[in-house]
Image (cartoon, rainbow, N blue to C red):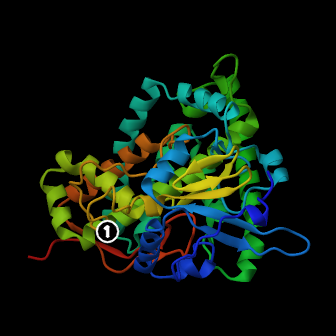
């Protein structure tokens, strides 16, 4: 779908410094970015931002920023107007990459997205989900036991990454001997995320990331063949044997789904877990409330962590048909970016949006998407993982806390934490 002609672009005067198309914007302090998004929400209509200036060889490339809660929700639910293909990330995936590795569900639209999601949803049987919830509790206990015994000083690698990685591998039925290599491949696929990485890394990462994905695809193809002939009680077996209107997942679809689970599911949940520790350390009154009655406040705490941290900052959409939204008329081919990080701080929806409050009710955050057909399929699983882990962490007779600021990636896509120093030690008497 083409870029709109320059004459059709409806420019708006932007607040100074509030330019999310500029890589330097994402190197600003977090508080400065929040102020900039607040200024953008105050505009009469969504602003337009230039990513690439026009030349004699190619037209201007830019996008409209949807920053208000209502606009993000509406665009998310109007999936026939604001479509995901050819891709929701920046840059959009190349055609040859999609051909080789298959389309990720996040980049698909109806009817293909509907059919694929139906197959995946049908595979999540009540029996499988019940076993997964029991496994989540077991993994959480093991992770915390190992942490107490080994006393590491860094939280992301030892706790936050391990929890969702082991849960997803157990759910899929990944053999133990595959897991170290898969963990390394996931790291290679997602390393150097952000806008501040050196040029050499920018040039190198795409090839390494594709090799990592290719290797995971090969592993999944091998496992798929094995489970078709010898099925077990895991998700791979369910996916390759699912029969929804005569359809099951082929090898490419299974590989694309597994890559989505590993790179997206592990990354987003580990980031939420890490931000949760920072937020509970920085807000001891909220931590005390949660510790005093975990069952009462746990669900609200998870939702508030996801709202406040917003693990996925934005997704992109392409306009398919002419439509008016938020005071702006969009034309076919226009690009829009849905900024969940801004929508989750919208003053018209959230009272004192910058305050971390686990009793916030209602809390219609968009941390799992804005609704519609692309609402996060793993939202329930992620909630259960975060709850189970913090039930273990907060119930042990030791004081858990972050002891330094998180090392944040300057990313325009996900709110990624590279590392977080922490201590888990007896409380001060």
Is 395 left or right of 266, judged from the image as shown? Answer: left
Asked which quadrant contains residue 397, the reply is bottom left
Residue lying at 74% horizontally and 31% vertically, measured from the top left = 250
Label 1 SS: loop
Is 76 drawn above or below residue 32 in the view shown?
above
- Say which residue label 1 marks: 354
- State the quadrant of the C terminus: bottom left
Is 299 drawn above or below residue 184 in the view shown?
above
Which residue lies most toward the right here? 57
Residue lying at 37% horizontally and 79% vertically, measured from the top left = 405
Asked which quadrant contains residue 25, the reply is bottom right
Is 104 left or right of 371, judged from the image as shown? Answer: right
Is 153 left or right of 333, judged from the image as shown? Answer: left
Between residue 158 and residue 52, name the one nearer to us: 52
Residue 294 in the image: state x and y as whole percent. Answer: 19, 50
Disc 1 residue crowd, few under 14, some 14–19, many 20+, Cα 10 Å = some
Circle count: 1
Residue 133 in the image: state x and y as whole percent. Answer: 38, 37
Residue 299 in the image: state x and y as whole percent. Answer: 27, 47
Residue 203 visible in the shown view:
yes
Residue 169 visible in the shown view:
no
Is 246 left or right of 347, judged from the image as shown? Answer: right
């Amino acid at each position: 779908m083409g870029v709109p002609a320059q004459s059709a672009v409806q420019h708006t005067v932007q607040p100074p410094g509030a330019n999310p198309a500029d890589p330097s914007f994402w190197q600003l302090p977090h508080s400065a970015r929040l102020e900039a998004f607040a200024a953008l929400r105050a505009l009469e209509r969504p602003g337009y931002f230039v990513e690439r200036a026009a030349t004699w060889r190619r037209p201007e490339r830019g996008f409209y920023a949807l920053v208000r809660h209502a606009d993000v929700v509406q665009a998310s639910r109007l999936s026939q107007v604001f479509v995901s293909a050819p891709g929701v990330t920046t840059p959009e995936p190349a055609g040859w990459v999609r051909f080789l590795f298959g389309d990720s569900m996040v980049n698909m639209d109806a009817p293909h997205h509907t059919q694929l999601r139906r197959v995946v949803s049908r595979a999540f049987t009540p029996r499988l989900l019940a076993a997964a919830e029991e496994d989540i509790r077991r993994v959480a206990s093991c992770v915390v036991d190992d942490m107490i015994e080994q006393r590491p000083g860094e939280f992301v690698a030892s706790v936050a990454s391990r929890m969702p990685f082991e849960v997803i591998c157990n759910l899929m039925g990944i053999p133990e001997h595959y897991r170290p290599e898969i963990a390394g491949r996931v790291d290679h696929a997602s390393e150097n995320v952000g806008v501040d990485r050196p040029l050499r890394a920018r040039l190198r990462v795409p090839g390494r990331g594709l090799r990592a994905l290719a290797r995971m695809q090969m592993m999944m193809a091998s496992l798929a063949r094995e489970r078709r002939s010898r099925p077990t009680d895991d998700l791979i077996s369910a996916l390759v044997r699912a029969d929804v209107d005569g359809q099951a997942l082929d090898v490419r679809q299974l590989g694309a789904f597994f890559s989505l689970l590993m790179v997206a599911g592990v990354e987003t949940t580990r980031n939420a877990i890490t931000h949760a520790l920072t937020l509970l350390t920085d807000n001891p009154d909220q931590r005390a409330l949660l510790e005093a009655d975990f069952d009462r406040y746990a669900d609200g705490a998870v939702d508030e962590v996801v709202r406040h941290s917003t693990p996925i900052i934005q997704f992109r959409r392409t306009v398919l048909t002419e439509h008016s939204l938020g005071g702006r008329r969009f034309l076919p081919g226009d690009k829009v970016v849905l900024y969940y990080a801004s929508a989750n701080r919208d003053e018209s929806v959230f009272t004192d949006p910058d305050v971390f409050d686990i009793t916030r009710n209602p809390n219609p955050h968009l941390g799992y998407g804005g609704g519609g057909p692309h609402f996060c399929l793993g939202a329930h699983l992620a909630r259960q993982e975060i709850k189970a882990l913090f039930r273990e962490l907060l119930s042990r007779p030791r004081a858990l806390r972050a002891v330094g600021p998180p090392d944040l990636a300057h990313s325009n896509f996900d709110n990624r934490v590279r590392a977080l120093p922490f201590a888990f030690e007896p409380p001060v008497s």
